Image (cartoon, rainbow, N blue to C red):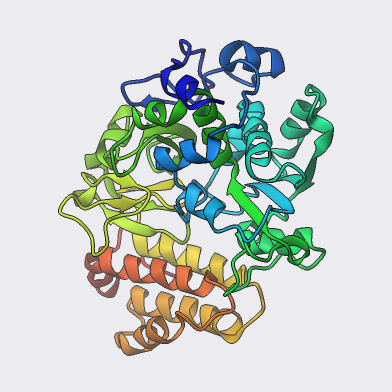
Amino acid sequence: MTSTNATTTAMPPAGTLPAGTLPLSTQPSRLFAAGPRADAARHVARFGPVPGATGLVEALRASGLTGRGGGAFPVSRKIDALAGPPATIIANGSEGEPLSRKDATLLEHAPHLVIDGLVLLAAAVGPRARLVVMAHPDGADSVRRALLERRDGGEIEVRVAEDRFVAGEATAVVAGLSGAPATPKDHPVHLTERGVGRRPTLLFNVETLAHIALIARYGAEWFRSSGTADDPGTRLLSVGGDGVAEQVVEVAGGSRLAEVLTAIGVVPASLRAALVGGFHGRWIAAGDFGGRLVARPAEGGSDDGDIAAGAGVVLLLGTASCGLRVSASILDYLAAESAGQCGPCVLGLPRLSRRFAEYSSGRDHDPSGVGYLLDTIPGRGACHHPDGTVSLARSALAVFTGELDRHRSGSCSEGGLA
């Protein structure tokens, strides 16, 4: 890739989109532009061959691309943090989040775009690196088929991730590749310094790599032509819940949640709230659906009420559903998904789940029990799983305060919590 080609090459006309994708921008879908289940021939006909990688890191820096796996860390900053040439580069499609289907959908319909991004990144920063695609069981076969169609396919390994919530976290993926249990760790030393085999490692979500492949072809200016100045490009969202069939949609950065819902045929007024960002995300009340879905809300919030897109998941809650009941069920799941490494996870999360159910159901009128756990669990775990779980519980209690009273009076539409 050269900088001149990157900024002047126009993307070809759109292809037919796979079912369940929707571009919400002034442009057609980018990631699914080659059509459903695109093989190598259709991929190359749509996007052309893999370009050169000259100037790719500079283009990524100018693009403002952030990671699409949930952390939203700037891609160029992660590359700049490398302690040396990466020994391993990982495309992470583990997708342990139960509500997410975006990565598996991308690997099913556009695997070559992901592989292109992995190959281009290696050419730019780690030409001798081990290349690995860590795929959810639902996406592994699509990647294997795609690799058989490519001359460079033999250079890339496919590993099937454990289908567990905590197994998709970056340090858990690296641990699994190193032969240890796939459990996350709090890592004071970044993976860019010491990862697989204790050597520098780069790990990006598969959607991030697909965007890298497009930036290599069309440049930073093209990437920024969709989205907003502070949240450029597009992102995938897995949307499901009350009033909508599960689907994956592609939206421009900075799209307002209400606009996304309206575009897929959901009436925002029919909803009570939405859980945005997955099980470690937060509840958004229907009155706040005007907020923009962005990679990273401004420090301290913003007047626009920006909403962190997180892992790219939106769970819709209808007006007839009980947010406390749904939250209690999620907390039960998260407590059972403990990595089993520390007290805040093994002991604290089950206690939080029980106390949350007791307090939110009205059986326990004293908020101090659940409040104590919400205050003491965060920041003490061996990974961030306890922190994310507490964040969800806090957001549920803040958004569904009215339901607390209904539970205590026995008037909840779902009959309270068991």
Q: Is residue 41 above or below residue 309?
A: above
Q: Is residue 335 above or below residue 174?
A: below
Q: Residue at x 58, y 39 (%)?
A: 209
163, above or below 143, in the image: below
Position of 318 compared to 145: left or right?
A: left
Residue 208 appears anywhere in the view: yes
Compared with 299, 263 (above or below) is above
- Residue 133 figure quarter: top right
Residue at point 44%, 15% (across, down): 10
x and y percent of residue 153 in the render?
80, 30
x and y, in percent, of residue 18 in the image: 54, 21
Q: Is residue 77 left or right of residue 397?
A: right
Q: Position of residue 135 (x, y in %)?
A: 70, 44
Residue at figure coordinates x 26%, y 57% from the top left = 298
Q: How many marks?
A: 0
Q: Quadrant of the N terminus?
A: top right
Q: Residue at x 15, y 54 (%)?
A: 303
**Residue situated in front as seen by the camera: 76 or 307:** 76
Residue 256 in the figure: left or right of residue 126: left
| Percent position of residue 302, x then y | 19, 56
Question: Where's the C terminus, which quadrant?
Answer: bottom left
Q: Nearer the viewer, residue 402 or 184?
A: 184
Residue 400 showing in the rendered view: no
